[in-house]
Amino acid sequence: MNEDELLNQAREAAASLAARAGFARPQSLDLIKFRENAVFKLTTPEGRYALRAHRPGYRTREEIESEAAWTAALREAGVATPRFAALSAGARVEAVQTSSGTEFLCDALEWVDGAPMERDNIADRFRQVGRIAAAIHAHARRWTPPAGFRRPVFDETTLFGKGGLWGDYARLDALSANQLDLLDKAAARVASILAAEPRSDDRWGLLHGDLMLENLLVDGEEVCVIDFDDCGFGFYAYDLATAVTLHVDAPCASAMIEQWVQGYAEITDPDAIGLHLLEPLVMARFLLGVGWLHGRAGSATAEEIGADLIAGACGYADYFLSSN
């Protein structure tokens, strides 16, 4: 099934859920985003919702339920997160089968007002991102997940390679032989570093996994953290890597990292999370991204960002191998 067909199936599943899951007289269902999941804005007389039709095979019911459990716990602890809506019979996740037989796991989150954190004065913004990351990590350290909690693990076996969560970078046809050789060498070095690093409680645990500015919605003085679809277990410094990877060539990259660390320090000790792992984790994030290009071949987003992402990954690999 190509991406256009998948989106059409996701739209059918979302419309079916909206009609049957207790929402009163749905007025509109508008596509907001289609990347890993199809996300629609559902408007009803009683309220608005972000309705997600999850890409088949990407997340299990247990993983989505676990996302809901953690975001609820974070919200209770003072970190603003979206609230999952109760669907049929109070469930937070429903399986919806389309007319073609494709099954989607669907959920609905109460709509969050606000706009993605602006990129002007981006270094200063990163101080706030660092504070938010620290609050999330501090909560994760003291929180006991409920029985049956399941989320992905981000390590040297899942961030890249044959077991890559987003696909295997080595299978991307767009890579030249020289580019593939370069990324293979970088991947081997990253794997060696991460495999040797102790997974102690101070630096390894539950994290957001995609803490970029677009996933921080600002409404006045409040910042709501959204898109926990990639939350999982990993080195806490990975949340900094996800925030900075696409900016590593920017003149203000060092200032962004410095501000993130200073913001983190307002909540808890940033040195404890293993900041020495930042460079290998940025390299891992690049490899993950190139793997995503293979897994999403043919999508509009892959076509749009593919060349730049490959160039960025190879450029960083040159730097990483020369300095590590």
Image (tube, rainbow, N blue to C red):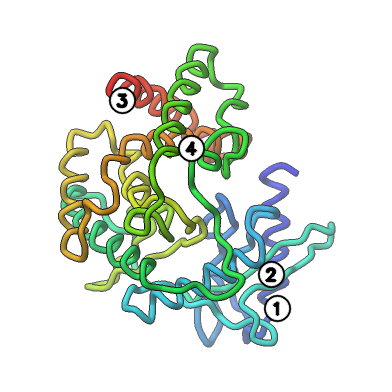
Which residue is labeled 2 in the image? 15
Q: Mark 1 points at which residue?
A: 19
Identity of the amino acid at label 2? Ala
Residue located at (29% from left, 47% from top) = 274
**Cα distance, mark 4 to mark 3?**
21 Å
Q: State the SS at label 4.
A: helix
Q: Is mark 1 on a helix, strand or loop?
A: helix
Q: Residue at x 43, y 53 (%)?
A: 209
Q: Circle 2 — which element?
A: helix
Using the rendered image of the protein, determine whether residue 112 is visible from the camera's viewpoint: no
Q: Answer with mark 1 or mark 4, whichever residue precedes in sequence.
A: 1
Q: Does label 3 or label 1 sit earlier along the sequence?
A: 1
Please rate how many residues cluster around mark 3, counting C-alpha atoms within 10 Å: few if below 14, some from 14 to 19, many from 20: few
Q: Which of marks 1 and 4 is in front?
A: 4
- Residue type, label 1: Ala
Counting every numbered tag in the picture gives: 4
Answer with mark 4 or mark 3, whichever residue precedes in sequence.
4
Amino acid carrying mark 4 in the image: Gly
Task: Kindly report the distance in space between the C-alpha atoms of the residues bearing marks 2 and 3.
Answer: 51 Å
Q: Residue 324 carries which label?
A: 3
Q: Where is residue 202 in the image (x, y as percent from the top left)?
A: 32, 58
Mark-to-mark CA distance, 1 and 4 = 36 Å
Q: Which of marks 2 and 4 is nearer the N terminus?
A: 2
The Cα atoms of the two marked residues, 3 and 1, are separated by: 55 Å
Q: In this view, does 58 lie above or below 158?
A: below
Percent of width and height locating residue 267: 20, 66
Q: What element carries label 3?
A: loop
Residue assigned mark 4: 289
Q: Quadrant of residue 128?
A: bottom left
